[in-house]
Image (cartoon, helix red, strand yellow):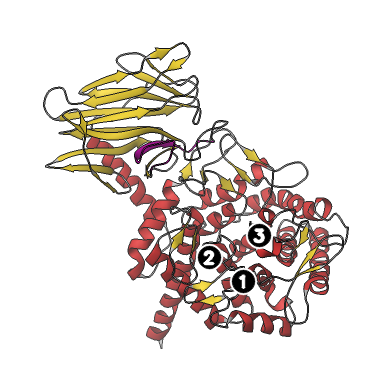
């Protein structure tokens, strides 16, 4: 449970050696050195007569309700992205924290207390009582509090209200809303306004659409540190950051509904582009990670936006042209150690398929989908160059794209399938990974027999094709793992890429079938990071924004096609 722009989240977490099971207030800021992965700050417990009592948690976009029966409850709502309001009826609430070096809870002004969190995530929280009483037990020992316990409970009657504000440097006095109900109304309206602009989907998916919209909305964080724009994190569960291909899919899904936010998603990683041209693997407010990169899908996504939205104004085309050019050239200048004109990946992470079986041998690996994406990226650069008056550069990009297409086929195609190639010695890497089918995104640029071979293989039930879509490793492969990350489960991004690829190859019916399988898979199993190809069960992160965004994009396209067919029938 979180809201647009916030770095705070509430999660129910299982027991581990480091923590009790329960409901936690967490931070989604970049972790402190040695901090906990989920950055749980405070355990929250409801109390009656001084003892913890069980409760049921129910979340809506604007409210988290903790119900303990007989009308006893606690309600939580965001007054602002950095301020959370609480209302208690018939119960008390206790926050507790196991402390480490320098963690402390000290009195501030006018009855407020300040929590400085050092060991988990380096943030500060201001506790402000509004109605009822606040008590604390935070014994001081030299440089930190030995433990921290904070109790809020009604003083006269059954009501208690308070606020928790999050800040980094200095806390500023704020004008609070008059009532908790006003917080609820404002939060409800904020989400409703967001959702009303989001893409329409077939009516039977209304509930899934609402959840997808909530995930996208609640995964936004405000500018802070390395985050220069409103940015959508992959999740506010474990994967707290914006990755440098996720952001493209977010831009695609938001282009019509929230164009400025869509553009901010696309540019957020380019804001941190290195002088060499490479984009960081990921960013959050405290971290820019350069250990890896992600695949150059940016040109393909931009072309999709050029064709299907009004997002790319002349001003924005000028803004992106040079950064996208540098990103493209980086692959040839810095990721082609053997100088054969075919860019390499130094790890599976660089291609976005972290543990794909293509990378079962030692890198660097030349993988064909990277070159395929770069072909499309150079064609997109050619189109942008034409639109902004750089006709000579446009022609250069087109020539380079044609040359790379020819090199790709010569380098990777083995008569009836693509292979990976180990850079340098150029030994073939045979793999049953779906990754080797991503070059199909080139569509009719590929020879007809190449396209037909690949599509025929994708259509065989029980190999890549499962009841729910495309497995990322052939189901008959000895290396297939049902929960194997990129060695089996279905993912959103490859589904969209292959949907586009099949459409580009004229396989409209098959593309529509794959799209429908994915739409149903996610609607039935939630917006997980990935899904069991055979059972449909969701795996890993269960609040994943790119699954949500891609699902919305595909479901909306299905809706639009249905409306066009209906309109066509009515007009005949």
Q: Which residue is mark 1?
A: 478
Q: Residues within 10 Å of mark 1 (few under 14, many from 20)?
A: few
Q: Residues within 10 Å of mark 2 (few under 14, many from 20)?
A: many
Residue 249's image quarter? bottom right
Camera-side residue of 475 and 279 = 475
Q: CA distance from mark 1 to mark 2?
A: 15 Å
Image quadrant in which the C terminus is located: bottom left
Residue 133 numbered tag: none
State whether the magenta stretch is mostly helix, strand or loop: loop
**Gap between marks 3 and 2, in whole Å?**
21 Å
Residue at image location 56% in from the left, 36% down from the top: 285
The quarter of the image holding the N terminus is top left
- SS at circle 1: loop
Q: Earlier in the sequence, mark 1 or mark 3?
A: 3
Label 3 vs label 2, nearer the camera: 2
Q: Which residue reaches farthest front?
A: 17
Q: Does 429 sit left or right of 523 as displayed? A: right
Q: Which residue is mark 2?
A: 489
Per the image, the residue denoted by label 3 is 297
Q: Are marks 1 and 3 in contact (CB under 8 Å)?
A: no
Q: Earlier in the sequence, mark 3 or mark 2?
A: 3
Q: Which residue is rendered at x = 45% and y = 16% of the image?
A: 144
Residue 9 or residue 549, whichever sits in front: 9
What residue span does the magenta drawing correspond to? 15-30
* Quarter-of-image position of residue 405: bottom right
Q: Earlier in the sequence, mark 1 or mark 2?
A: 1
């Amino acid at each position: 449970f979180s809201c647009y722009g916030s770095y705070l989240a509430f999660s129910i977490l299982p027991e581990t050696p480091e923590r009790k099971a329960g409901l936690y207030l967490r931070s989604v800021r970049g972790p402190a050195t040695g901090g906990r992965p989920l950055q749980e700050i405070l355990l929250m417990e409801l109390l009656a007569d001084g003892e913890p009592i069980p409760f049921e948690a129910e979340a809506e976009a604007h409210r988290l309700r903790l119900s303990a029966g007989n009308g006893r409850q606690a309600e939580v709502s965001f007054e602002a992205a950095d301020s959370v309001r609480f209302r208690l009826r018939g119960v008390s609430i206790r926050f507790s924290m196991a402390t480490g070096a320098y963690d402390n809870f000290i009195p501030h002004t006018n009855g407020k207390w300040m929590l400085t969190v050092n060991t988990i995530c380096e943030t500060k929280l201001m506790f402000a009582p509004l109605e009822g009483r606040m008590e604390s037990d935070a014994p001081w020992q030299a440089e930190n509090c030995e433990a921290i316990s904070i109790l809020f409970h009604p003083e006269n009657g059954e009501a208690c209200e308070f606020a928790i504000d999050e800040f980094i440097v200095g806390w500023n006095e704020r004008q609070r809303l008059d009532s908790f109900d006003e917080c609820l109304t404002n939060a409800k309206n904020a989400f409703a306004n967001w959702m009303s602009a989001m893409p329409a989907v077939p009516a039977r998916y209304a509930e899934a659409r609402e959840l997808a919209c909530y995930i996208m909305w609640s995964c936004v964080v405000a500018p802070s540190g390395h985050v220069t724009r409103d940015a959508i994190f992959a999740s506010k569960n474990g994967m707290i950051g914006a990755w440098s291909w996720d952001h493209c899919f977010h831009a695609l899904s938001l282009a019509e509904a929230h164009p400025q936010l869509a553009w901010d998603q696309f540019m957020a990683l380019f804001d941190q582009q290195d002088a060499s041209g490479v984009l960081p693997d990921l960013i959050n407010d405290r971290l820019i990670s350069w250990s890896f990169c992600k695949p150059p899908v940016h040109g393909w996504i931009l072309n999709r936006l050029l064709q299907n939205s009004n997002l790319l104004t002349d001003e924005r085309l000028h803004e992106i042209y040079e950064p996208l050019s540098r990103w493209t050239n980086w692959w040839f200048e810095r990721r082609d150690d053997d100088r054969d004109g075919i860019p390499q990946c130094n790890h599976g992470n660089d291609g976005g398929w972290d543990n794909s079986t293509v990378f079962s041998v030692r890198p660097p690996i030349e993988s064909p989908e990277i070159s395929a994406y770069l072909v499309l990226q150079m064609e997109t650069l050619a189109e942008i160059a034409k639109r902004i008056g750089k006709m000579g550069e446009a022609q250069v990009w087109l020539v380079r794209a044609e040359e790379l297409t020819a090199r790709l086929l010569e380098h990777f195609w083995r008569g009836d399938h693509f292979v990976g190639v180990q850079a340098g010695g150029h030994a073939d890497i045979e793999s049953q990974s779906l990754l080797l089918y991503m070059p199909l995104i080139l569509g009719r640029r590929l020879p007809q027999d190449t396209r037909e071979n690949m599509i025929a293989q994708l259509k065989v039930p029980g190999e890549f094709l499962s009841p729910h879509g495309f497995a990322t490793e052939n189901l008959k492969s000895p290396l297939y793992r049902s929960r194997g990350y990129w060695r089996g489960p279905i993912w959103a991004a490859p589904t969209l890429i292959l949907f586009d690829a099949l459409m580009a190859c004229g396989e409209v019916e098959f593309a529509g079938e794959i799209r429908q399988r994915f739409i149903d898979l996610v609607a039935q199993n939630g917006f997980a990071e990935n899904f069991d190809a055979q059972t449909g069960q969701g795996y890993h992160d269960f609040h994943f924004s790119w699954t949500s965004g891609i699902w919305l994009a595909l479901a909306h396209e299905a809706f639009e096609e249905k409306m066009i067919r209906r309109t066509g029938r009515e007009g005949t």
